[in-house]
Amino acid sequence: MDNLIIYFALYLVIINLITFFLFWNDKRRSKKAGWRIPEKTLLGLCVVGGSVGGILGMRVFHHKTKHLQFSVGMPIILILQVGLFIFLFMRSF
């Protein structure tokens, strides 16, 4: 059980760092009119655990803040993830 928690925490750190980096990269590319990272990719990373990195990336880089699916959707995703985690944690005891 301890290893599972360590692996899960490591996964969350990595996926959030990747998501944060991709928000930075997409913002940088938007200024240079380069190839952009699809919104589905950014939201997908948030769904699979990178919601904290996505929210931080959105706030730090002021990126996608006017898009409703990001400004409202990502906090909802985070709330659902925290709720699921609490439910699974309580169920394990």
Image (cartoon, rainbow, N blue to C red):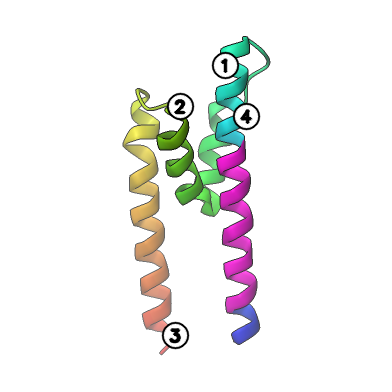
Query: Neighbour class for label 1 at 10 Å: few (<14), some, many (≥20)?
Result: some
Give the structural element (helix, strand or loop) at label 3. loop
Mark 1 and mark 2 residues within 8 Å of each other at the beta carbon: yes
Q: Position of residue 43 (x, y in %)?
A: 51, 38
Residue 81 shown left or right of residue 20 in the figure:
left
Name the quarter where the C terminus is drawn. Answer: bottom left
Give the structural element (helix, strand or loop) at label 2. loop
**How far apart in space, not on screen, are marks 1 and 2 (Cα)?**
9 Å
**How far apart in space, not on screen, are marks 3 and 2 (Cα)?**
38 Å
Mark 4, residue position? 25
Q: In the current view of this chain or complex, which residue is farthest to the front?
A: 60
Decide which of tag 3 and tag 1 comes sooner along the chain: 1
Q: Is residue 14 magenta?
A: yes
**How far apart in space, not on screen, are marks 3 and 1 (Cα)?**
45 Å
Place residue 19 in its image quadrant. Answer: top right
Q: Position of residue 2 (x, y in %)?
A: 60, 86
Q: Amino acid at mark 2?
A: His
User: Which region is colored magenta?
Assistant: 5-21
Q: Nearer the viewer, mark 3 or mark 4?
A: 4
The circle drawn on residue 30 is 1
Mark 2, residue position? 63
In percent of the image, x 33 and y 55: which residue is there?
79
Number of callouts in the render?
A: 4
Mark 3, residue position? 92
Decide which of tag 3 and tag 4 comes sooner along the chain: 4
Name the quarter where the N terminus is drawn. Answer: bottom right
The circle drawn on residue 51 is none
